[in-house]
Amino acid sequence: MHAQATIRDETAGAVPAEGFEMPAEPVEIEPPDLSPWRRGNAGVDYVHTMTCDRPGPHVMVSAIVHGNELCGAIVLDELLRAGVRPSSGRLTLAFMNVAAYERFDPEHPVLSRYVDEDFNRLWAREVLESRRDSVELRRARALRPVLDGVDFLLDLHSMQYSSAPLALSGAARKGRDFARALGLSAHIVRDAGHAAGPRMRDYAAFADAASPRAALLLECGQHWKRETVARARRAALRFLDHFGVELPEPPPPPDGAAARLIEVTEPITVRSHRFRFTAPYRGMEIIDKAGTVIGFDGDTAVATPYDECVLVMPSHRASRGTTAVRLGRFVG
């Protein structure tokens, strides 16, 4: 017999066990007009690279990998208008899946995540070099030469539900060290990604433990909250200041709270045509007892594999082949 759910939530208090519906989140922010930034200077539309004669790394901030995640678009628009410049090396600011972003409708805000397929599941060489075709694959192929030259990447994202910010660092230790060096209070999530395909932050050398190149995917908060934009702005400024970029304002100080490390032990990939949770999980709930049923994949119960199991970014709209939730535990 499975254990009865006993839940602690670091961000929202107690969670009801049944009789739930996930309410629609209000859209508090407006997507900026990106047309002034279409003509980039890196050979690819919507990609802007600034170079300094003084040697240094190539650093990049990317946004709208998913078209309905607006915070990064707002922050990059601000940085480009402010005329930020590197004091050494190169700085690239890039809007990624613009085709999906241009479809954003505040009346139906969840529908513009992508056009044909998830842009953030394509970053394997065999996929990029395959004969497959989609709007997202054409864009990824165009952007690939830019990514091939980047030393350090900050990829700005947001989440379905209000939750603590998360820095997804990949499986290699260098990602965790990179996240801590930026002085952010976001929980650091060490994970290997999704069964559906590699993320951009896991592309090539970023995922190679032997390479000094590193990438960080930052989940800044709920998609359409003002506070999510503030977190994305703070993170981008911390990142740019870390690499000596000349900023239009003093950088924010390092966050006071120490980042905690969550090790993801397994993603729950949906196998059936219907996945449902047993409670309205929003993320960062801690399930006390091993064997607690947290959902059903078709008729198959999904239970926590160990005590103190952390639910990372549950999705109540997960479909077959996608990730419903990641199961993890705090380390250290």
Image: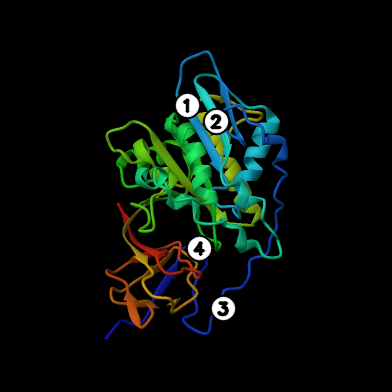
| Residue bearing the label numbered 1 | 58
Can residue 253 be seen here? The reply is: no
| Cα separation between marks 3 and 2 | 41 Å
Q: Label 4, secondary structure: give it.
A: loop
For the rendered model, the colour scheme is: rainbow
Q: Amino acid at mark 4?
A: Thr
In which image quadrant can residue 40 be found? top right
Marks 1 & 2, CB-CB < 8 Å contact: yes
Marks 4 & 1, CB-CB < 8 Å contact: no
In front: mark 2 or mark 4?
Answer: 2
In front: mark 4 or mark 1?
Answer: 1
| Residue bearing the label numbered 2 | 92
| Cα separation between marks 2 and 4 | 34 Å
The image's mark for residue 121 is: none
272 up-or-down from 332: above or below: below
* Badge 1 or badge 3: first in the primary sequence: 3
| Cα separation between marks 4 and 1 | 36 Å
Q: Label 1, secondary structure: give it.
A: strand
Marks 1 & 3, CB-CB < 8 Å contact: no
Task: Name the spot of residue 111 as percent of width and height, x first.
Answer: 61, 62
Residue occupying the far front of the picture: 131
Q: Label 3, secondary structure: give it.
A: loop
Category of crowding for the residue at label 3, using alpha-carbon neighbours closer than 10 angstroms: few (below 14), some (14–19), many (at least 20) = few
| Residue at image point 44% right, 29% down | 149
Task: Name the spot of residue 230 as percent of width and height, x first.
Answer: 62, 47
Q: Amino acid at mark 3?
A: Glu
Category of crowding for the residue at label 2, using alpha-carbon neighbours closer than 10 angstroms: few (below 14), some (14–19), many (at least 20) = many
Q: Amino acid at mark 1?
A: His
| Residue bearing the label numbered 3 | 21
Can residue 239 be seen here? The reply is: yes
Q: Amino acid at mark 2?
A: Thr
